[in-house]
C-alpha cells in the first residue's frame, strides 16, 4: 500500500496563493525515498498532508489500496510521522513514551509496553529505555521517533529532515538504523543532505515551487550530474542541473 496525494490543493491562509495546486504525488511502496528541494519548496507541507496533520483544501490524500483517506482516524494508525522536533513528553522514559504512542495508535496497554521494549532494541536504545526522554541527545530522540513507528507497525514512515543538526557519529548511527528499517517499511524522508544520502536512497524526488521537478530511481537522478562532477559530488551536481542552477555539460 502506498500513500498518495491526488490533485491536492493547499494554502495556509485563505487569501494567500496555494502552496500546492492540483498537486499529485505517490510515495513508492518500498525502500527509501528522499525528497529534496530548496527552502520553501513545499516539502514539509507535502509531508504534513501525507501524515494527515493538515487537511487539503481540494483533492484527496489516500492510502492506496485501503480505501482510507487522511480524514479517517484509521489512516493515522498506518502512517508514522516524525517531525523535525520529536514531540516527546520530557518526564516520560523512552519506553513509556514509545508505549504511549503505540497505545494512542490503537495497541492495548500490555502489547504497547512489550512492543516498545522490542522497538527500542531495534533502534539500538535498549540500554536507554529507562531514561527520561529529556535526558536523551537529539540523535537518540530521533531514534525514539523511529521506535514509535516500529512499535505500532506503521506501513509507511515519514521523516522531516531527521539528520539535520546531528553530529557525524549520530548521523552514521541513524543511517544504520534507517537502512535496516527500510528493508521492511517504506520511508519518505525530506533532507538537504544530498551528498550523504543519494547512494542509500532507492528513489529521489526533487521539488521546487510546489511542483515535482524530478521523480525516479536514484541512478536516474545521478545521470543528470555533469560528467566533470568531482567523485562524490554527483548528487550535488545532479541537483544543481535539475534545479537549473548549473548547465548540464
Ligand atoms: N505555517 C505556515 N503559514 C504560512 N505559510 C507557510 C507556513 N508553513 C510554510 N509556509 C509557506 O509555504 C511554502 C512551503 O513551505 P514548506 O515549509 O512546505 O517548504 P519546505 O520545502 O519544507 O522548506 P524548508 O526546506 O525550509 O523546510 C513556503 O512559501 C512557506 O513560506
Image (cartoon, rainbow, N blue to C red):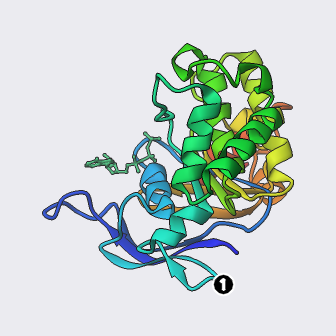
Question: Relative to 131, is 197 above or below?
Answer: below
For the residue pair 13 and 226, the one nearer the viewer reads as: 13
Residue 245 in view (yes/no): no
Tag count: 1
* Residue 13, position as x, y percentages in the image: 18, 58
State the quadrant of the N terminus. Answer: bottom right
| Residue under numbered circle 1 | 65
Q: Residue at the location (61% across, 42% down)?
A: 99
**Closest to the observer, 143 or 133:** 133
Q: In this rendered view, identify the residue nearer to me: 36 or 45.
A: 45
Q: Residue furthest front?
A: 110
Q: Residue at x 63, y 21 (%)?
A: 166
Is residue 21 something that shows in the picture?
Answer: yes
- Secondary element at image label 1: loop
- In the image, 127 versus 201, the foreground residue is 127
Residue 186 position in % (x across, y down): 74, 59
What residue appears at the point 68 percent right and 42 percent down from the top-left corner? 113
* Residue 62 pos. (x, y %): 53, 77
Percent position (x, y) of residue 34? Answer: 67, 50
Which quadrant of the view contains residue 114?
top right
Q: Is residue 221 above or below residue 24?
A: above
Q: Residue at x 69, y 63 (%)?
A: 155
Amino acid at each position: 500500500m502506498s500513500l498518495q496525494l491526488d490533485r491536492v490543493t493547499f494554502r495556509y491562509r485563505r487569501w494567500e496563493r496555494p502552496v500546492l495546486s492540483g498537486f499529485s504525488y505517490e510515495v513508492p511502496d518500498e525502500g527509501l525515498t528522499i525528497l529534496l528541494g530548496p527552502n520553501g519548496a513545499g516539502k514539509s507541507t507535502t509531508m504534513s498532508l501525507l501524515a494527515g496533520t493538515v487537511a487539503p483544501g481540494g483533492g484527496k490524500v489516500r492510502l492506496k489500496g485501503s480505501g482510507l483517506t487522511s480524514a479517517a482516524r484509521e489512516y493515522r494508525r498506518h502512517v508514522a510521522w516524525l517531525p523535525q522536533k520529536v514531540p516527546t513528553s520530557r518526564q516520560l522514559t523512552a519506553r513509556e513514551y514509545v508505549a504511549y504512542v503505540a497505545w494512542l495508535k490503537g495497541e492495548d496497554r500490555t502489547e504497547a509496553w512489550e512492543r516498545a521494549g522490542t522497538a527500542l532494541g531495534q533502534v539500538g536504545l535498549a540500554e536507554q529505555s529507562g531514561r527520561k526522554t529529556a535526558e536523551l541527545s537529539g540523535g537518540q530522540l530521533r531514534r525514539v521517533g523511529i521506535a514509535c513507528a516500529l512499535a505500532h507497525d506503521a506501513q509507511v514512515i515519514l521523516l522531516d529532515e531527521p539528520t539535520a543538526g546531528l553530529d557525524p557519529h549520530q548521523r552514521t548511527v541513524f543511517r544504520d538504523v534507517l537502512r535496516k528499517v527500510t528493508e521492511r517499511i517504506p520511508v519518505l524522508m525530506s533532507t538537504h543532505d544530498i551528498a550523504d544520502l543519494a547512494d542509500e536512497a532507492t528513489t529521489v524526488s526533487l521539488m521546487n515551487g510546489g511542483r515535482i521537478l524530478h521523480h525516479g530511481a536514484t541512478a536516474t537522478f545521478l545521470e543528470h550530474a555533469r560528467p566533470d562532477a568531482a567523485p562524490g559530488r554527483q548528487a550535488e551536481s545532479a541537483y544543481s542541473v535539475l534545479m537549473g542552477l548549473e548547465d548540464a555539460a
